[in-house]
Amino acid sequence: MGIRFILMVNKQGQTRLAQYYEWLTLEERRALEGEIVRKCLARNEQQCSFVEHRNYKIVYRRYASLFFLVGVDNDENELAILEFIHLLVETMDRHFGNVCELDIMFHLEKAHFMLEEMVMNGSIIETSKANILTPIQLMDKAS
Amino acid sequence: MGSQGGFYQSKEFLDLVKSIGEARSKAEEDRIVLNEIETLKRRISEPDIPKRKMKEFIIRLVYVEMLGHDASFGYIHAVKMTHDDSLLVKRTGYLAVTLFLNEDHDLIILIVNTIQKDLKSDNYLVVCAALNAVCKLINEETIPAVLPQVVELLGHPKEAVRKKAIMALHRFYHKSPSSVSHLVSNFRKRLCDNDPGVMGATLCPLFDLITTDVNSYKDLVISFVSILKQVAERRLPKAYDYHQMPAPFIQIKLLKILALLGSGDKQASENMYTVVGDIFRKCDSSSNIGNAVLYECICCVSSIYPNPKLLESAADVISRFLKSDSHNLKYMGIDALGRLIKISPEIAEQHQLAVIDCLEDPDDTLKRKTFELLYKMTKSTNVDVIVDRMIDYMISINDSHYKTEIASRCVELAEQFAPSNQWFIQTMNKVFEHAGDLVNIKVAHNLMRLIAEGFGEDDDSADTQLRSSAVESYLRILGEPKLPSVFLQVICWVLGEYGTADGKFSASYITGKLCDVAEAYSNDETVKAYAVTALMKIYAFEIAAGRKIDMLPECQSLIEELLASHSTDLQQRAYELQAVIGLDAHAVECIMPSDASCEDIEVDKSLSFLNGYVQEAIEKGAQPYIPESERSGMLNISNFRNQDHIEASSHGLRFEAYELPKPTVQSSIPPATLASNELVPVPEPVYSRESYQTPMPSVSSDAGSSELKLRLDGVQKKWGRPTYSPATSTVNSTTQKTVNGTTQVDGASSSNSRSRETYDSRKPQVEISPEKQKLAASLFGGSSKAEKRPATGHKTSKASSHTVEKSHVPKSSVEVVSEKRAPVQPPPDLLDLGEPTIASSAPSIDPFKQLEGLLDPTQDASAVNHGSTTVTKSPDIMGLYAETPAGIQDKDDNLLSGLSNLSVTNIPSGTTTTTSMQSSKGPNLKDALEKDALVRQMGVTPSTQNPNLFKDLLG
């Protein structure tokens, strides 16, 4: 399965994007997000970018005010996930230009669309920025 | 921020987003969202809402759910939106639906139809949107509705569609493997797709398929190898490159697959050696992604049939990881070490100090990973050190999930490798004391059995000693408040069996303690049951020894209370106790022989002792008993059990439940007779049975029965003899037959002497603290060399001192080495943009490193290189990031300022900035040092990339 969820959370702990690849109820999500965010936000920059939480491993990375958190299975390559986060940010950056928290908030659906192109069934399926962005650009043009 | 708000976004939406963004607390956010829910409830069902508006409403609904509130009132509108003709609106609808609904939601049925229609669309983007939804919403029952179309789409001219169709099949395979079992060949076919994206995606289902059935895919080894080779040789389009690495994510997936296919298969593995070796050589070890691929190579190498050269490369990479300053790399290094150690155990030794550093690191993640490594390398020679460490850590944490895990690991290691029984008991006590509620009850039964069985028949005095020390330790531990139930059960049982055995403690003392337990934990019936039975045993032993029993008043009141207990089990025990006390010494001795818990019990299954009674009854005219096997077919109404049986089987239900009572009926007879004082006519065998039965007359049914199992199955002790014998051989010179703790002292002193040897020999450079040395010696010294130690003690000490030196050298003689060595080491986290405020101090680290000589030299070398030379790729980026932040310090919503610079400016301009920066602070170490000192004086928190530096400086 690999990736179980992808979260974007700002440094106040407010969720900015949440995508789950396994079904959790609203309550479960809320609890999980609370616990994870508390855990990750408390860590400093020198510590590993990986945290174990229950049966998940969280790989997280901070960009200015925004944290990207990816929950993965135990046998996932953590460094690769860390770089996947960066690829995601680079892709968003290419699309939005200087992407910031507000870009994601105002274009939540687009951020989701990008994720939909990159990850399916919890596996990374596309890493070419051009391929990820083409459908979104086409849609923009059409509307 | 230029992109905020599009021309099609309403003011309302902008305001909502802004107010959420500005909310300062969860409460405020909740209030905003609750308001929003009210608004949406009112507005969303108005007639004739324009599409755009509706799309906005749906996104607002997504917000509502994302922020933790229920938006189910609007689900139906999201479903309706999937019908829309406009692609953007449709896709938003699909997105919302996949976020809101799980696959079993009632509304799904309304979507399946739309999906079916969309899968046939001419617009490939519509098809893609539908396939996304398929991957999230189709469950086992709805698979057939879309399967034919999905299969058809595998041949779609657009690669994006083929890719998603593959993933849809992948999903079906997850949901119901049988539904696509006939389509598995499609995955193989798509592996050869000429679009690399489709090929890359196909690796995901193939990985899963291979995980479950390796052998069917051995023929693909060659294909995978050749794909990997092509990828590594940059044959894929440039678009797949990531930070100058050719399609790293595909490489990683392929390496994972190869690891599976090559595991335990020499022939398959041989095909892989070349390509994996190439990747080892080519991989850029200065970037995160390069290291990610290298790590995956190590995983692969340690999984496939071993190849010495590859193992060597892997070991090199591991040592680079471990020497790195980046915690992330250390973490990966520890993990990789744990994998490689299975194949070449000797590699751990050269990293002992690095491992201990990680173990003592304040970072919990790293610590846990290191414990995992230690767990993998535990042997009988180092088990005590490792388990002690684990227990200390276990005590220090609160996270019950991990506590359970580490507790069960301690138990497992202790059972497997225990150097002595004494140590085992002490270790178990600690585990029970601190995590008793989290460990399996079987562990407790094992411990009781160990204490009862002791070392074996040949060494009675040692057994006695073991028991006395157990009793003593338990009496001490009972003083602690709030002990876990499982542990109390063990304590009660041991006190009952052996509390008075060595005569050290009086019966009244022990019984008093037991009463205290029963009182203090009066809510725990199991504990109480154990306590009462223990009381009974103590009294029985007293009576059997001919002493007069003098029941303590609290005991009496306890028993009186239990006689009226709601729990029939407790009641029965209390009555039994009363009955036993009333008997004479001989009878009591037969019922409760001391230390007989290990005696074999002959169960008289035919109940022959009742023969006389049966005979009498038959003579009086009772029906003779017909065995079950002989009365098949005839319905005997007078026989209840038989009737039950038939009834049960005819309904096909509760078969088990009715079967069970048979044994209980049997075993409940003796206690009953016992209680009613009709013991005398019962023949001999029953006594032995009784003696077994009474210590634990089925506590609560499950505890009793599992204990029953434990005793009867005669399972070999898991922690048993083989590991025990080596331990004696090392200790036998000293007095082994002493009290509590001797063995431990021995262990300590031997490890002491060992570490002293190493310590002496490397005196000239005392930088590593002796404790660390000692720990290292006790952890690692016990490996292959330790076995040889008795013969050639000198040699070992030399060898280990050598390893110490080796790991020490690069640290002390930094400057020289750093000049010579080519840049290899990556800066900790090249592209991490980090918190702007601190980035300014990052560059000044390098000079420090050189001065301190604490960190890996190579990094400095690379930094210096940039300053002096021309173009280099990634490290410049680092420079860029380090510089930019000062400007954007307060403007932190500019997420990627650094990064955007990178993407805009080309490499040459990047270089110039770095160069100038380097010239200003790089080469002049003294300046930088002063600067940094100043910065720190001014109170800037030294919380940047390099923890060690500041830790060491600040103490």
Image: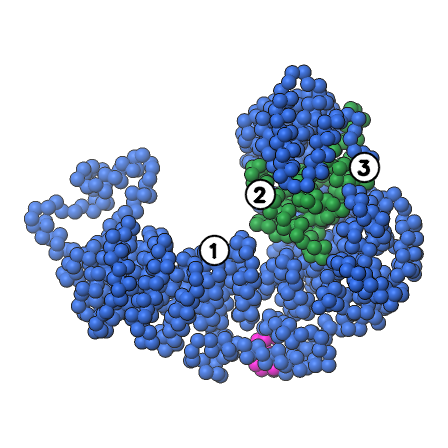
Chain colours: A green, B blue
Could you tell which of marks 1 and 3 lies nearer the N-terminus?
3
Badge 2 is on which residue?
Answer: A31
Give the camera-side residue of B240 and B467: B467
What's the residue type where badge 1 is placed? Leu
Q: Amino acid at mark 3?
A: Met
According to the image, label 1 marks what residue?
Answer: B438
Q: Secondary structure at mark 1?
A: helix
Q: Position of residue B620 (x, y in %)?
A: 7, 48
> What is the residue that sits farthest to the top in this orientation?
B48
| Residue range highlighted in magenta | B784-793
Residue B12 can be seen in this image: yes
Q: Amino acid at mark 2?
A: Ala
Chain bearing mark 3: B
| Chain under disc 1 | B
Residue carrying label 3 = B1
Quarter of the image holding residue A6?
Answer: top right
